[in-house]
Image (cartoon, rainbow, N blue to C red):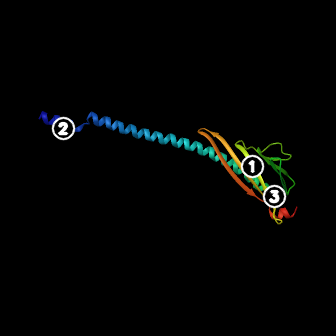
Amino acid sequence: MSGSRARAGRRRGFTLVELVVYAGLVSVGLAVLLGLEVSARRTAASEGDLLDVAAEADALLGAFRLDVEAARDLRLREGGLDLERIDGARVRYDARGREEAGDPARRATPSLAGLELTLLPSVGGAPPVARAVARFERRGAHGLIARRFERSAAPRLEVWRAR
């Protein structure tokens, strides 16, 4: 009887080797989960930086498009694009961003690293086409984020003809 109890007691428990293997598997699983968590946090942080850069680019290039569409005069000079809108406002775009005459505050674009402007001349009475290529750079928590955005626009035909 004591022999059968001894065999039954051995069957109920785990051997030391089984416990060590189990602990090793649990450790590996936890390490994988921790790695996934760290990766997800980094991705979320860099996505936030990318969204901020995209919002800055959209604000600057959206204003560029609206200004050019409402322009009755466009001139490319001294590394910048000068334009006069139909409402008489004068706006200048250069490597630092957008500046409206009479407005001492330059539109904030802290991540703007450069703005290349070109003006394709008018052909056959059609309005010229202005093109802006903006480079944005932002130092994020996990390195430098650099993106390039491009926008082209032309004055509206009715505005251009009314000048």
Residue at 36 percent across and 39 percent down: it is 25
Outermost residue, left direction? Answer: 1
- At numbered mark 2, what does the secondary structure look like: helix, strand or loop? helix
Q: Quadrant of the N terminus?
A: top left
**Label for residue 116?**
1
Of circles 1 and 2, the one toward us is: 1
Residue 159 position within the rendered picture, expressed as x and y whole percent measured from the top left: 83, 62
The kind of residue on which mark 3 rests is Ala
- At numbered mark 3, what does the secondary structure look like: helix, strand or loop? loop
Q: Quadrant of residue 157?
A: bottom right
| Dot 3 or dot 2, earlier in sequence | 2
Residue 61 position within the rendered picture, expressed as x and y whole percent measured from the top left: 73, 52
Residue at 68 percent across and 51 percent down: it is 149
**Label for residue 8?**
2
**Label for residue 70?**
3
Q: Quadrant of residue 127?
A: bottom right
| Dot 1 or dot 2, earlier in sequence | 2
Placement of 155 over or under 115, stated as above or below: below
Q: CA distance from mark 1 to mark 2?
A: 83 Å
Residue at 81 percent across and 58 percent down: it is 70
The kind of residue on which mark 1 rests is Glu
